[in-house]
Image (cartoon, helix red, strand yellow):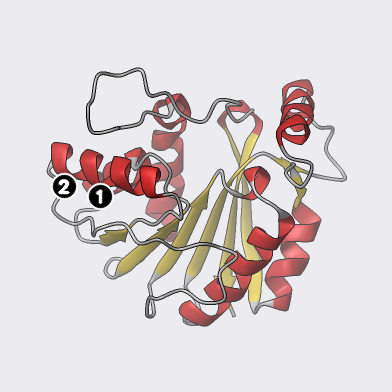
Amino acid sequence: MADSKPWLTDMPSAEEQRHAPATMRNRDAIVDVLRAILPDRGTILEIASGTGEHAVYFGNAFPDLIIQPSDPDPECRQSIAVWTSREAVPNILAPLPLDAQAARWDIGKVAAILCINMVHISPWESSIGLMEKAGTLLDPGAPLYLYGPYLRDDVETAPGNMAFERSLKSRGLRWGLRDVADMDALAANNGFRRESLIEMPANNLSLVYRKI
């Protein structure tokens, strides 16, 4: 189950460096998947980078790649910048203010797009925007990677994920766990096919799509 409290600000920092507890628990499992799907070179765009901890970890794990974090929240972008500076990771770019629901993204072609734990804590329109823009930014064969809790018609939803779903709805009626079949259909409408579905820790999934 994804954490209901996405980040903590109780670590001492006058610069608002945020910490997401889930990052420490899922980052190695995510990197294991990314090693199999990311290209050897190029710019990797992360959408909804949040605290920036994943971006820093990915930058260290993939020194030959350029990591481009982004987040529409200025406080998150500040946290990303602080993490990047403090960890001295040279292959991470300054965070961009990209919003999945914006009409366009001010960025050119990228080699891959990552989106971790955004789909369920945003309206469905954000998933639509993510897929639409990914379809224009990625060349054929390039991966779009999604991580988080999802629903499946043929698999019973874990009790923890159902409790998390209720928590999400209490905070935003347009939030909630999405069905893998709906994500697949949305991806297909934007020129993607699902390459794999990978079981991850704490009843999360990795969904790997490729641009056709």
The residue that disc 2 covers is 89
Q: Residue at (31%, 68%) from the top-left corner?
A: 43
| Left or right relative to 16: residue 51 | right
Q: Position of residue 108 (x, y in %)?
A: 37, 80
Q: Which mark is residue 6?
A: none
- Locate residue 172 relative to residue 65 in the image: left or right: right
Q: Secondary structure at mark 1?
A: helix
Amino acid carrying mark 1 in the image: Gly
Q: Which mark is residue 59?
A: 1
User: Is residue 209 shown left or right of residue 69?
Assistant: right
Q: Is residue 108 above or below residue 23?
A: below
User: Which three-letter amino acid code belongs to the residue tagged 2?
Assistant: Val
Q: Residue at x 16, y 47 (%)?
A: 89
Q: Residues within 10 Å of mark 2 (few under 14, many from 20)?
A: some
Position in image of residue 127 (x %, y %): 66, 60
Q: Position of residue 134 (x, y in %)?
A: 53, 72
Rate crowding at label 1 as few (under 14), some (14 to 19) or many (20 or more) other CA atoms within 10 Å. Answer: many
Sequence-wise, which precedes: disc 2 or disc 1?
1
Quarter of the image that includes the C terminus? bottom right
